[in-house]
Image: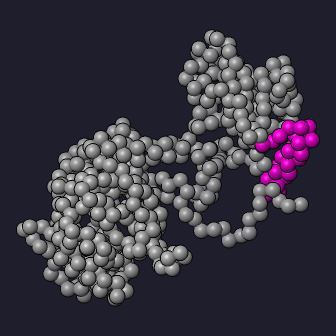
Amino acid sequence: MENTKISEKDERLKKINTLVSEGVNPYPASSKRTHTIDLVLQHFDQFEKDQSAVIIAGRLKSKRAHGNLCFSNLYSNNFSIQLAFSKKEMLGGDGFEYKDFIKLIDIGDFVEISGICFTTHKGEKSIMVKSCNLLTKAILPLPEKWHGLKDDDEKLRKRYLDILMNPDVFDIFVKRAKFWEATRNFLQANGFMEVETPTIENTTGGAEANPFKTHHNDFDIEVFLRISIGELWQKRLMAAGIEKTFEIGRAFRNEGSSPDHLQEFTNMEFYWAYADYEIGMKFTREMYIYIANQVFGKTKFKTKGYEYDLNSEWSKIDYCDEILKQTGINILQASNEEMENKLNDLKVKYEGNNRERLTDTLWKYCRKNIAGPVFLVNHPKLISPLAKEKDDNRDQVQRFQIIIAGSEIGNGYSELNNPIEQRKRFEEQQELIKKGDAEAMMPDWEFVEMLEHGMPPTFGFGFGERLFGALMDKPLREVTLFPLLRPKKENTSSVIDEK
């Protein structure tokens, strides 16, 4: 099979040499295209009636020659139209003669076509080609039409071919673009201002995660890629008097991969002065319903076997009660040893034996059994270092997580704005770091100083592409254009081998 590929590649290289020798540039810089394929299809009847020439461009995805007639399909931007090449109609001129087209143009080549719209006797909208020019000569062939790319790693590594050969994959990323567009539109329509905050930070705030770190040569300091979308920066803007902000951007966490986790991903976070988590629950439910309708035209979905309707009532479940119900452990009273024993009994792997990490691991075991959509509430203060305490229970915080199909699909809370309490919690996190907890939150003392100047009551919320993956019922890698992959171990030669 490999020898066949090499042979076909060599044949195409020979064609390039022939083209160059005949004065044809296999890689011209521009095209005279006048219409896109979708525009031609949209106004096809009028073009056919007028019999005016259209010039389109795209990639040939098929070539079926029958003597003096050849049919092909031209593809671009997920639209395709049939082309009819005839020896009688193609008279050369500025483009190829029919015989040269048959001999020198291959499936996979990008071409520019000038022709007249017509409908075949079978009713297929087509273009009778008057002239054809080469725009890009493909040296390697496309995957076979009916087999395509089968290996999952190869699909991600050669995503450009996977998208080209599979309209369903193309559609995923059209929907992904609409997903973030709908998110942005909803927030802006509700008075939120889009902002940009640093991606490189002195300390990583806003989440508990292991960061990527690097060295800043000019300052000669160690810096980190952010693990949240500017939480501590956006809250500084609340202190500045900007009442509603949001950011959509990339976050980075140096942790393991799973269907719900990647090391680099897109998230959104917004912050809303003078609002709390109760207001936030109503607002975020409305936002999810809006996004679902805008992108998918529906609110009913099936994810990981769970069926749910975003337009239903979202109930509330208690963090501690849910863990007690599923595991028999009262996390507010149980000892660390009892929590460890339970995790061992459940055969759940965990890192670190501090109380915060044990509590979080128990919850994550329980989370996968919840269909949702529900609001998880009454989180222990222990695992929420940036959330405000509840007035009626100082051991719990004003926080909620949105749970859908066993995964956390959103996180929000009334922001802690008491500088004295925030300093205390940062000191507790610092002790965890000293004891080796890689996911503990780095203290940001300049953030505490901002709080000492005063920050209004604020609600903050974030969600990411995990929500999009859930609504598509796909793992994150499949809804990410170019997820990070291990380099291939074998040496790879360039497309054109040096002779």
Is most of the magenta stretch helix, strand or loop? helix
User: Is residue 87 at all visible to an observer of this figure?
Assistant: no
Residue 189, placed above or below residue 341: above
The coloring applied to the image is: one colour
Residue 21 horizontal/vertical position (percent) = 92, 41
Residue 298 horizontal/vertical position (percent) = 34, 39
Residue drawn at (79%, 53%) of the image: 5
Residue 183, placed above or below residue 367: above
How many callouts does the rendering have?
Answer: 0
Residue 326, placed above or below residue 85: below
Q: Which of 194 and 152 is in front in this view?
A: 194
Residue 29 horizontal/vertical position (percent) = 74, 40
User: Is residue 430 at all visible to an observer of this figure?
Assistant: yes
Write the start and end of the magenta stretch as one range: 1-27
Residue drawn at (45%, 73%) of the image: 224
Q: In which quarter of the image is the C terminus?
A: bottom right
Residue drawn at (21%, 80%) of the image: 424
- In the image as oriented, which residue stretches furthest toward the top? 49
Residue drawn at (55%, 63%) of the image: 484
